[in-house]
Amino acid sequence: MNLRARILGLISLSALTLFSCEEDISTIGLPPENNLGIFFAEIPLEDKVSQVWVDGVNTRGTGSIMVGAYQDPAFGLIEAKNYSEINGSSVTFESDATFDSVVLKLRLSSVYGNNIEDTEHRLSVFQLADSIPITENGNIRSFTSSSSESVADQIGTFAFQVYPDSLGLEFSDFNIDLNDSINDSADSAFYEKNFDSEDNYIYSHQTKLDQGYGADLFAQLKTNQYDSAGEIAALFKGIHIQASEVNGAILNYSIGSESGLYFYYTEDTTQKTVRYPISSSISYNNITPNPESGWSGSNFDDLNQLYEPYVTTNNEAYLQSGTNLLMKIDMADLKEAMRDTVPTAIVQSAELVMETISGDLEELSSLGFYLTSKDSLANEKYRVANVPDLSNTTVTTTFDDDISGYKVEVPLFIEALTSQDEFEFDQLMISPISSTLGLPQNSVRRSVIDKGSVKLRFFYTIPEKN
């Protein structure tokens, strides 16, 4: 009988009290044998939980500009800065073209922090000292959360308040009929100005940049011919955006059809506009904490070693995107105990459960589960294998409102862990994941886990007892 059939067959029996062996759970959570050879175990894993801080995750080309800073009650100071090139194509200007102004426009896609609405957010904009090099010493350059560029002069500032209710609005939310002839012209103009091609509201922030900076660039664009995006990038050099102060949130701007530098100029008394977009491929975010600038004001400021398991001194465990803070569960003792006590056990179903400690910030929406060994982790390999599910794909889970936490089925992992002598991957890694199953680098969303709630629940059988 295959594992799927065994699990389905066990579901109808699991409600019977004959499976309840919890009164006799041993020190590792395994009940003694019974005459039926079918067992249920709930194993607390609180003492097996640790943190692992990793690095080397690419932050370039995520499609997002992350900027801001906030003080997290558990994670301390969280800050994001962005470095981006400007690209575009050559534009021919008339000889009488005169420069008016240059505006940086950014489309807001999300915001995360503990003081979003009740504060004025201030950002500073700088010109880079040079364009962003993609190679270094003849090799492709690695862009991580600790990467940075040299900056030159400050060329602008933002100051604004954020209204989260405006994020995610669609044209249908405004109850406007574009076919209404009475207001057709005004409504159409409102639609064209404020909505994209998919009818989503364009929530943007914009600021006028330094007049001298814009005038100098415009003079060169008008005078010289730039035939490639690389030549445009070399002219502009790029921009750097950072928070002017700890403002209470990380702002996430999308790199798309709206974000960019807008040059306003006049030709023959007519005002015109040309947009130079922010590069989607040569743009990256620096996120603190990182190996160059450690944890500050967190519950674990002494966590300073990458890839080395760290045990918190409280009842909490932590997961965070962007800073690449992962959680590890050491399953080695369970493996040895099962092999020593019930070596012929067959795992029928297994579920890992962990609850979060709620707060004011949104929890991580998705987690992925991976395997490594102690030796592999020491060699900076935290993801040697995936935890497979019954479809043989990577095990993932989403936040479960019913338990205010996460639960995930891991029967194949527990079966391999407890029955295969050659199976060495007894370190379970838990990570935030993106849609591509990678560590997200366009978010700093995080979760605080109650270590006392981390448990493995599973049914197993002993064949010779059936």
Image: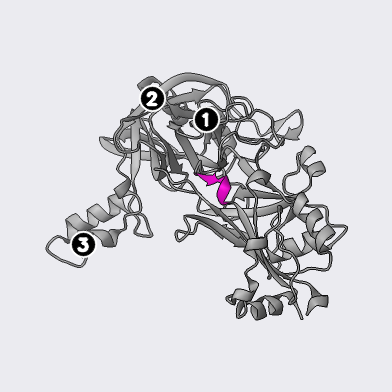
Image quarter where the N terminus lies is bottom right
Image position of 96 with respect to 165: above or below: above
Q: Residue 408, position in %: x, y? A: 60, 61
Disc 1: which residue: 298
User: Disc 2 on helix, strand or loop?
Assistant: strand
Left/right placement of residue 217 relative to residue 318 reads left
In the rendered view, tell whether residue 379 sits above or below residue 196: above
Can you give x and y, in whole percent of width and height, for residue 78 in the image?
49, 32
Q: Quadrant of residue 117?
A: top left
Location of residue 445 in the rendering, given as x and y in whole percent from the top left corner: 49, 44
**Compared to 112, does 133 lie above or below?**
above
Sequence order check, earlier mark of 2 and 1: 2
Q: Nearer the viewer, residue 304 or 264?
A: 304
Is any part of residue 89 visible from this angle? no
Mark 3 or mark 1, which is nearer to you? 1
- Sequence-earlier tag: 3 or 1: 3
The answer to whether the residue labelled 3 contacts the one labelled 1, judged by CB atoms less than 8 Å apart, is: no
Q: Which residue is mark 3?
A: 176
- The residue identified by callout 2 is 156
Q: Within 10 angstroms of label 3, few (less than 14), some, or many (20 or more) residues?
A: some
